[in-house]
Amino acid sequence: IGFGGSPVRLVAQAAGGRPAVLVVDQLDALSVLVGRGETVLDGVRDMFTQAQATGNLRLLIACRSHDLDHDRRLRRLIDGGTEDGQSTASPGFLKVVVGDLDAQQVQDALLALGVLPTHMPPRLQKLLANAFNLSLLANIVEDARRDPQALPFDLSSMRTRLDLLAEYDRRLGRRLRRALGNDGYTTSVSRIA
C-alpha cells in the first residue's frame, strides 16, 4: 500500500526494539464464506510468519467466530496447520471469545450515548448486547446528533440486526451522496461491491 515494506517490518522498526502490537482486524473478511481468494490469504500467512520471527512483536487478530468455525482455511492459518493436516501450531496463539455484554453494560452504553433505555423490551436488550449491534446503534445515534438535517431516530423501530444495518446504511448513504453526489456514491459502491 505504498509504505515501503511489510506491516510487520514497519511496526517492528517503528517500535525500535520495544514491545509492539500489530492489529489484524476483520480476518473474517478473507473467509471463503465471503468469496476471497487464496492469494490474499497467502499474504496474511506470510505476515504471520514474519511476525513470529520478530521477537518484540505480537499480533492481535480479530475474526468473527462463525467464519473461524466454518472456514478451514482460516482455522489452518490460526492453528498453523498445513494442507496435509499436519499441525505447526504456535504456542503463542491464544483464542479469546468476546461474548455479549451484560444488561448493565448495555444500559451504561446507552446512557453514554444519551439514549434513555427506559422500558426497553427484552428482545432489544438482547439485540444490543452484541457489541457489533451496539456499535451500529452508536453510529446511528451519533449521525442523528451530528447532522441537524438527519432523519429522526426511533429506537423502538429497531428489532433486528437487519433493521440496524438498514438504518446505518440509509444514513451513511445519505452522507456520502451529499459529499460525493449521486454519481460518485453509486460509482464508489459499485467499486467496493
Image (spheres, rainbow, N blue to C red):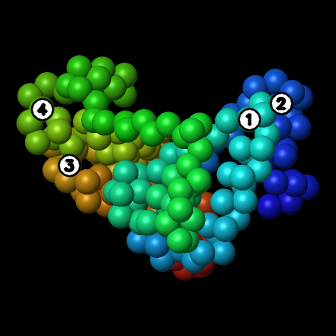
Q: Are marks 2 and 1 in contact (CB under 8 Å)?
A: yes
Q: Amino acid at mark 4?
A: Met
Residue 142 on image: x %, y %: 43, 38
Say whether disc 1 or disc 4 marks the residue closer to the N-terminus. Answer: 1
Q: Are marks 3 and 1 in contact (CB under 8 Å)?
A: no
Say whether disc 2 or disc 1 marks the residue closer to the N-terminus. Answer: 2
- The CA distance from mark 1 to mark 4 is 44 Å
Q: Which residue is mark 2?
A: 15
Determine whether the residue tagged by mark 3 lies in a helix, strand or loop.
Answer: loop
Foreground mark, 2 or 4? 2
Q: Which residue is mark 1?
A: 57
Q: Amino acid at mark 1?
A: Leu
Q: Amino acid at mark 3?
A: Met
* Quadrant where the N terminus is found in the figure: bottom right
Q: What's the mark number on residue 158? A: 3
Determine whether the residue tagged by mark 1 lies in a helix, strand or loop.
Answer: strand
In front of the other: 86 or 55: 86
- The CA distance from mark 2 to mark 4 is 46 Å
Is residue 70 something that shows in the picture?
yes
Q: Which residue is mark 4?
A: 120
Q: What's the mark number on residue 47? A: none
Foreground mark, 3 or 1? 1
On the rendered structure, is 2 left or right of 118? right
Is residue 181 something that shows in the picture?
no
Category of crowding for the residue at label 2, using alpha-carbon neighbours closer than 10 angstroms: few (below 14), some (14–19), many (at least 20): some
Residue 9 on image: x %, y %: 84, 46
User: Residue at 91% of width from left, 55% of height from top?
Assistant: 4
